[in-house]
Amino acid sequence: MKFAAVVTAAAFTENQPESDTDMTTASTSLQNLASARDLFALTKPRVMSLVIFTALCGLLAAPGALHPVLGFTAILAISLGAGASAALNQWYEHDIDSVMKRTRSRPLPAGRMDRDTALHFGIGLSFFSVLLMGVAVNWLSAAILAFAIFFYAVVYTIWLKRNTPQNIVIGGAAGAFPPMIGWTAVTGDITVMPILLFAIIFFWTPPHFWALALFVNSDYSKAGVPMMPVVAGRQSTRKQIFGYSLILAICAIAPFALNATGAIYGTAAILLSIFFSALSFRVMVSKTSEPSDMVQEKQLFKFSIFYLFALFAALVADRAILAV
Ligand code: HEM
Ligand SMILES: CC(C)=CCC/C(C)=C/CC/C(C)=C/COP(=O)(O)OP(=O)(O)O
């Protein structure tokens, strides 16, 4: 311990700036570090980690083989494209992000970054990710990636979000493309299975998001965003959550029912979907109006994330076992 303390102290002393110029350089690099951190935050890394995971699972579950370097490049391109679309989303939404409690400490509303930086970063990274995918992997995957970025940054963010309570139902398509892109990176074509993977995330998105929207409702109404609970009310949203969770169950079990996967995926899909539907049912029959008492909604939101993670992990595990 003592030795470690001496070494740390020595290293610290060694790194001390000796002059004013050193001090300026040190503070500039600290600022650069802070903005690098903010650029990273602009990519919504926590949300995108699951997006990237579903893309990776799509790639690993697809029939055929892709050289590991190309597989890595495909996932890198999807990650950069997803991050770029999130940056463009925040460039456009700086006004409503500064009104909502949940989003006002983001780099733009908090004033730690100017809008042009976010715009240039988002556009530059979008082009780079699509070109990388096209040149290194294939142009079908690049085209779907470009469409997904456009769908999130323009169709959802600019057009749908502020105009219709169906915003996340239609806009959710953007988040449903990544496993399809992972799949086409390997196969180069679109078959029933990548369409089903798309459908799973498409029908998962409304319960995932509306569960959250129910307990952050006041944020959205304050910002004037017509999310479903704001426009149609809590009870209608709760019924729709249950409806979508039943459609989700059908889509999740379909790959097994169609013999496209084995029993590992089938068992996981059935158990996870029963639990998801049960939690959605509890939300539907709940009458709570106080956000702090919305235990069922909070549980459903948390479980939605586990559900998608576990379902896609089961898909890959199933494929790995079948291959042995
Ligand atoms: C239009 C579609 C979607 C909407 C509107 C939406 C909205 C949200 C919101 C508002 C949050 C709260 C956290 C935050 O402040 O960012 C959240 C969390 C999350 N979302 Fe979604 N989401 C959507 C689609 C997706 C998709 C497609 C995925 C992954 C495949 C995903 C994964 C996650 C994860 C992992 C979290 C938790 C992040 C954390 O722990 O902070 N979401 N989502
Ligand atoms: C490859 C590719 C382009 C992937 C994109 C994946 C995608 C669309 C994910 C959606 C995730 C997300 C953070 C939605 C938040 O909605 P919001 O922006 O309305 O949330 P906010 O209120 O937190 O800003």
Image: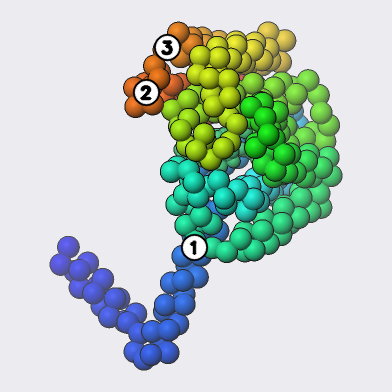
Q: Is residue 133 above or below residue 281?
A: below
Tell me the kind of residue under disc 2.
Glu
Near-viewer residue (168 or 224): 224
**Residue 43 visible in the snapshot:** no
Task: Give the answer, above or below, for where 31 lies relative to 272.
Answer: below
Q: Amino acid at mark 1?
A: Arg
Say if 100 sits above or below 270 in the image: below
* Residue shown at the point (71%, 56%) measured from the top left: 123
Amino acid at the residue labelled 3: Ser
Which of the 4 image quarters holds residue 175?
top right
The percent coordinates of residue 8 (x first, y second) are 26, 71
Residue assigned mark 2:
290
The residues bearing labels 2 and 1 have C-alpha atoms spaced at a distance of: 34 Å
Badge 2: how crowded within 10 Å, few (<14), some, or many (20+)?
few
- Label number found at residue 286: 3
Q: Residue at x 72, y 53 (%)?
A: 126
Query: Within 10 Å of the Cα at label 1, are there few (<14), some (14-19), or many (20+) other Cα atoms?
Result: few
Q: Which quadrant of the figure contains the N terminus?
A: bottom left
Q: Earlier in the sequence, mark 2 or mark 1?
A: 1
The secondary element bearing badge 3 is classed as loop
- For disc 1, the marked residue is 112
